[in-house]
Structure formats: structure tokens, C-alpha cells
Image (cartoon, grey):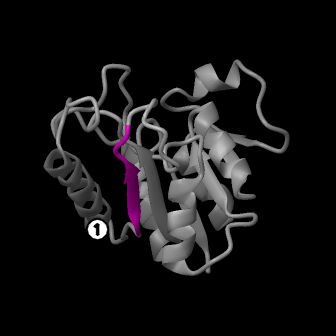
Amino acid sequence: MKLLILDRDGVINEDSDAYIKTLDEWIPIPSSIAAIARLSQAGWTVAVATNQSGIARGYYDLATLESMHARLRELVAEQGGEVGLIVHCPHGPDDGCDCRKPKPGMLKQIAAHYATDLTGIWFVGDTSGDLQAALAVDCQPVLVKTGKGERTLAKPLPPGTLVFDDLAAVADRLLS
């Protein structure tokens, strides 16, 4: 199985330090939507693992989050692709869950859903937490410079981390 796992905010859509709280605030990175569609058309399964502590903080509800993900699926479908499983962690940083990145719970959930081993699977993110979650399950950590990626790049990266300008560049590499 050709599986690619993506973080959401900062990789697929614009990120905000004030949280993405409404469908109107969920602004896709156009090249990312096209990249997901291209990968899907080429036989890749593209799954998403996203921390959404704004739910625990009361900034938005599950219905709002689901509307954002429905919009993501719609935009990718308009370009002839599809998005696979989307998992989210609704917990806050101090809730002690095992799903919030940098913990690997969501990645394990994706592995179980697809009945696959994650060793070597690319996990694309824009934060240190994403890269740490990837390492915890033997995924290949991949950093994009979009979102918080430039900030993350200013810190030491885990050995072997691949770095790309954006998700479109990741797709170009996987499809070449």
C-alpha cells in the first residue's frame, strides 16, 4: 500500500496561532489540495492526523471540525482525488491522552485502520511534535516549510528528516 500521512494545519491549510475556529478561517493552501489530488490519482492513500485542541478549549465544536474536513474532501474531489482516513485529537495539551502529537496514538489508529505497518511511511508535518510522532512509530519524518515549518527548521531536526518547501514538492518527489 502506498500510504502518506499528513498533518493538517500548516501542511494542507494555512495555520493560525489563534486557531482555525470556523469554516471561513479554514483556508486551503491551493498547491496542497492539488498535491493530494495528484497523489490520490496515482494510487496513493492520503490520510490525515491532526491535533485539534481548540475543541477542548471550547473554541469550536466537532460539527465545525467536520465541516472543515468535508470541505477538504470536496476540494480534493473537485480535482479528481480523494482523502483517506482523517483522525483528530480533540484533547488539550494537559489532558494526558495518547493521541495528541508528539504522542503517536493517531498514527497507530491510521495503521490499524489500514492494517499496515508504518515503518518507512512518510509523515508530513510542520512542527517538532509532528516529527517526534513520526519517529515514535518508525515513520519517515518529513518537514514542510509552510505553516510553522520555517520556525521548526530553526531548531535541531531529528536525524534523517526530509525537508521540502511545501506539500506540492513532497508530491513531486513521491511521483517522480
Looking at the image, which residue is at 54% across and 42% down?
A: 101
Q: Considering the image in quadrants, where does the N terminus appear? A: bottom right
Q: Is residue 34 left or right of residue 176?
A: left
Looking at the image, which residue is at 73% across and 49% down?
A: 135
The percent position of residue 70, horizontal first and vertical second, equals: 21, 59
Per the rendered image, the range of residues in magenta is 85-91
Q: For mark 1, what is the residue?
A: 77
The residue lying furthest to the right in this view is 159
The percent position of residue 112, horizontal first and vertical second, equals: 54, 74
Looking at the image, which residue is at 35% across and 40% down?
A: 52
The percent position of residue 32, horizontal first and vertical second, equals: 44, 49
The percent position of residue 47, horizontal first and vertical second, equals: 47, 63
Q: Residues within 10 Å of mark 1 (few under 14, many from 20)?
A: some
Q: Is residue 24 left or right of residue 151?
A: left
Three-letter code, disc 1: Ala
Q: Is residue 145 above or below residue 172?
A: above
Q: Is residue 69 left or right of residue 45?
A: left
